[in-house]
Image: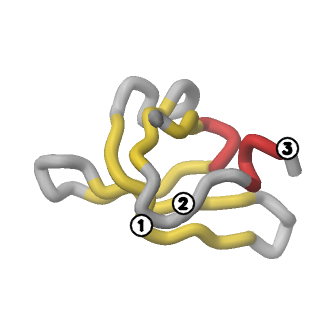
Amino acid sequence: MKSEEANIQNGDHCTVVAGTHKGKSGIVQDKNLSKTGHITITVLQANGERFKTLGRNVRVVL
């Protein structure tokens, strides 16, 4: 697990920089550790839509 992935917390504003949802942004709602050891998060967009992505694909916006 990368240290940047570990810094993602529920309520953080983030932008997706890789993967299927690249370019989307929103608020982290649900952070989980999968059976395989990867961090997965649910992101809530401003328009109310939710999507799931891997923690390694997002960057926290300060």
Report, in whole angstroms, how far the alpha carbon at label 2 lies from the one at label 3: 15 Å
Instruction: Quickly name the residue at label 1.
Output: 29
Which comes before the other along the chain, label 2 or label 1? 1
Task: Give SS at disc 2.
Answer: strand
Which residue is under mark 3? 2
- Describe residue 35's horizontal placement relative to residue 45 as left or right: right
User: Mark 1 vs mark 3: which is more N-terminal?
Assistant: 3
The residue under the point 12% across, 49% down is 47
Mark 3 crowdedness (10 Å alpha carbons): few <14, some 14-19, many ≥20: few
Q: Are marks 2 and 3 in contact (CB under 8 Å)?
A: no
Q: Is residue 28 left or right of residue 56?
A: left
Query: Residue at coordinates 85% horizontally, 44% vertically from top-left?
Result: 2
Q: Amino acid at mark 1?
A: Gln
| Badge nearest the viewer, 2 or 3 | 3
- Asked which secondary structure carries label 1, the reply is strand
Instruction: Answer whether labels 2 and 1 touch (C-beta < 8 Å).
Output: yes
- For the point 62% across and 53% down, the residue is 8
Badge number at residue 41 = 2
- Residue 17 percent coordinates (x, y): 53, 25
> Picture quarter containing residue 39?
bottom right
The x and y percentages for residue 27 are 36, 53
The amino acid beneath tag 2 is Ile
> Which of the two marks, 2 or 1, is nearer to us in this view?
1
* Residues at marks 1 and 3, CA–CA distance in whole angstroms: 20 Å
